[in-house]
């Protein structure tokens, strides 16, 4: 599994399509986008990681690099998203940070 992460609108989907050699329609079947949102709703992050690891790629938007929300639920959602990203990165064969459309490999090798 390839885990891609980075800021909003940084080109993560375009890089995923390039790495998986697929178009937008095929990407929807082979990749989970916005994984950080799934962490908000899931109580068992280990089980969620198991499910997500079956896809060819998982994309998450970085959270926690900005202003800390006043709302407790929002802070907890960000923490869960960060913990999910750590679990996915540990499980992934390849971890790629995408910034300005440029893939930066942190773990493994690009296919």
Image (cartoon, grey):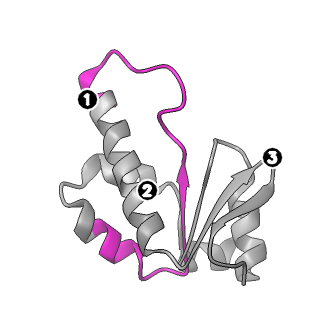
* SS for dot 1: helix
- Residue 92 in view (yes/no): yes
Number of residues whose C-alpha sits closer than 10 Å to that of mark 3, classed few (under 14), some (14–19) or many (20 or more): few
Q: Distance between the residues labelled 3 and 1?
A: 30 Å
Magenta span contains residue 56: yes
Nearer to the camera, 33 or 44: 44
Picture quarter with the C terminus: bottom right
Residue 71 sits in quarter: top left
Identify the residue at horizontal 41%, vertical 77% (top origin): 53
Which residue is outermost to the top? 70
Query: Which label's residue is closer to the chain start, 3 or 1?
Result: 1
Identify the residue at horizontal 49%, vertical 19% (top origin): 67
Q: Where is residue 23 in the image (x, y as percent from the top left)?
A: 75, 76
Residue 99 higher or lower than 47, as above or below: above
> Which disc, if any, is residue 85?
2
* SS for dot 2: helix
Q: What stretch is highlighted in magenta?
A: 48-74
Q: Position of residue 49 (x, y in %)?
A: 34, 69
* SS for dot 3: loop
> Which disc, if any, is residue 100?
3
């Amino acid at each position: 599994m390839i885990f891609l992460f980075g800021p909003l609108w940084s080109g993560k989907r375009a890089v995923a399509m390039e790495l998986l050699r697929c178009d937008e329609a095929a990407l929807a079947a082979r990749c989970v986008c916005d994984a950080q949102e799934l962490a908000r709703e899931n109580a068992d992050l280990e089980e969620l990681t198991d499910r997500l690891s079956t896809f060819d790629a998982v994309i998450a938007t970085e959270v926690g690099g900005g202003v800390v929300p006043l709302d407790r639920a929002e802070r907890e959602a960000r923490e869960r998203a960060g913990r999910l990203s750590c679990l996915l990165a540990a499980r992934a064969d390849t971890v790629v940070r995408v910034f300005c459309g440029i893939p930066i490999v942190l773990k493994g090798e690009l296919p």
